[in-house]
Image: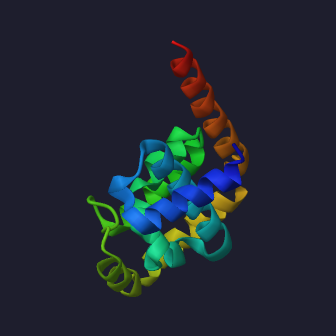
Amino acid sequence: MNTDLAAQRALDRLEESGFDALTETDQTLATAWLVEATVENNGFRHFFASKRGNVAFYAPAALRMIGAAQLAAIATEANAVFGPDGPPRDRKTRQAMVRAFDEPTRRILGSLEERYYRCPEDVDELLDAFLNCREAKQIRHSRV
């Protein structure tokens, strides 16, 4: 299956049913795609403040699942600016916290964005490999 199409379908299901109703594959596809698209274009503060940030809590796990260990570590550090519980799933709560970030916290996020941009891991390629691996497993299981 085309990765962009699979990601779009996962995003549609996320919008329709919510994160918890998704399969692990859809959670991973949707989250990795949302993190990459938002952080790459607008940075972590925008990601956290936007509706897309509703999946921020899962970002490190999703990035690890696709094999983006360095990006997962960066996402873990970014989530840590919210404290030990990470970013709240509730957007309004998260937005208020983002608006209240002090200058040192903003600098930390800026530094993490720079590391994210320089990271050699290619999320698109990793998502392709992740999805191809999942499809291969499904084919093997259906033959058994």
- State whether residue 3 is above or below residue 83: above
Front residue of 108 and 14: 14
Outermost left residue: 85
Left or right: 86 as drawn, with respect to 106? left
Left or right: 143 as drawn, with respect to 16? right
Q: Name the quarter where the N terminus is drawn.
A: top right
Left or right: 62 as drawn, with respect to 91? right
Front residue of 53 and 7: 7
Counting the numbered discs, the total is 0
Q: Position of residue 45 (x, y in %)?
A: 50, 77
Front residue of 18 and 32: 18
Task: Judge whether residue 120 can be spotted in this image.
Answer: no
Outermost top residue: 144
Q: Position of residue 82 (x, y in %)?
A: 33, 68
Front residue of 8 and 45: 8
- Its colouring scheme is rainbow
**Residue at figure coordinates x 51%, y 73% from the top left:** 47
Task: Judge whether residue 83 can be spotted in this image.
Answer: yes
Q: Position of residue 32 (x, y in %)?
A: 56, 54
**Residue at figure coordinates x 40%, y 68% from the top left:** 54
